[in-house]
Image: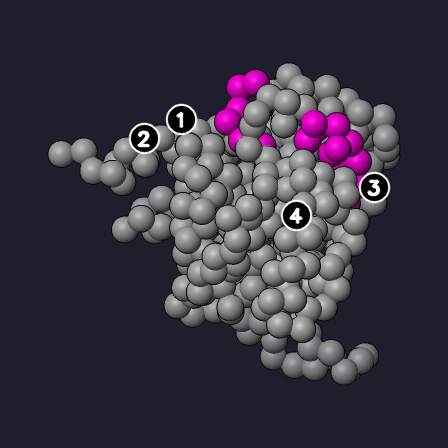
Amino acid sequence: MITSMTIAKDRLQVARVLVVGDVMLDRYWFGTVDRISPEAPVPVVRITREEERNGGAANVAYNVVTLGAQASLLTVVGDDEASHRLEALVATTGISPYFGRDAALKTTVKLRVIGRQQQLIRLDFENTPKNEVLASQTTTFAQLLPSHHAVLFSDYGKGGLAHISDMIARAKAAQKPILIDPKGADYSRYRGACVITPNRAELQQVIGPWSDESDLRERVQSLRAQLDLQAVLLTRSEQGMTLFDADGDCHVSTQAREVFDVTGAGDTVIATLAALMASGISLREAMPLANCAAGLVVGKFGTATVSYEELFT
């Protein structure tokens, strides 16, 4: 007997999401801490294991394919060791990579040093891409757009989405669902998107602090109308998430069993939404499942993903 879940899985397997945005290579150095340095009052970490993972938009795309859908990843990276490591890592996941390269660009690397199951320090290596590389990204975007069912912009504020307004216009003209994980205090460049998914701190940067739920509702609906957005999904950590759209607002409570690490939870939320919407499920139907996926991923260490089986069984 074919169940509704089997049908959902079949629909996911043919759904194609175009992920565009800032990628990074997440590096983890794990070690033991047995003493304090004689040079300064800091722990000495003896590294015993190293690990590399997809970061930024690459982690978003990885979440899409782990759930069972297909993902293409359009981004700009340097022509350096980190970019080639990341592209090789992406290729092993089944993601289709479209990497623009800029020899003057340093591919973003986030290096986390872990000791005694705790993150001791994070070191970031990055700079910003040149405009001409970003322009070529727009051309590739136009070529990829027709073969995808949804477009997801993952903005980490690293400069890889300088031409996002043009890409949104193209996607809107093609009647594709447009999902955006936003960054910064100016959301005007996201005008016309289907849904943006800020967390509390990100939304406060744009609309200011709110006094109560009524004030929040009024401010978000005003923002939504001003920017011609179909919806705003506010992720609220331990308080779950709230969706604001033309029908009003609806809320789902958090489903985290145990919070171990919140790294990448926002990636999982928007990737789950995009995969489900690409398969034809409405945003309101997809939201509780995205909330459930976030509850699963925060129980894992570092940038992680959720499989179809974990989410639906």
Disc 4 target residue: 224
Residue 68: % across, % down: 40, 36
Q: Give the Cα separation between the discs numbered 4 and 1.
A: 31 Å
The earlier-in-sequence mark between 4 and 1 is 1
Disc 3 target residue: 128
The earlier-in-sequence mark between 3 and 4 is 3
Please, is residue 12 above or below residue 23 in the view? above
Between 300 and 10, the residue placed more toward the observer is 10
Q: Give the Cα separation between the discs numbered 3 and 2.
A: 40 Å
Residue type indicated by callout 3: Thr
| Residue 14's disc number | 1
Where does the magenta region start and end?
145-169
Residue 265 in sight here: no
Residue type indicated by callout 1: Val
The earlier-in-sequence mark between 3 and 2 is 2
Give the residue displayed 56% in from the left and 64% down from the top.
236
Residue 253: % across, % down: 44, 65
Q: Secondary structure at mark 1?
A: helix
Please, is residue 255 above or below residue 175 in the view? below
Give the residue displayed 41% in from the left and 64% down from the top.
255
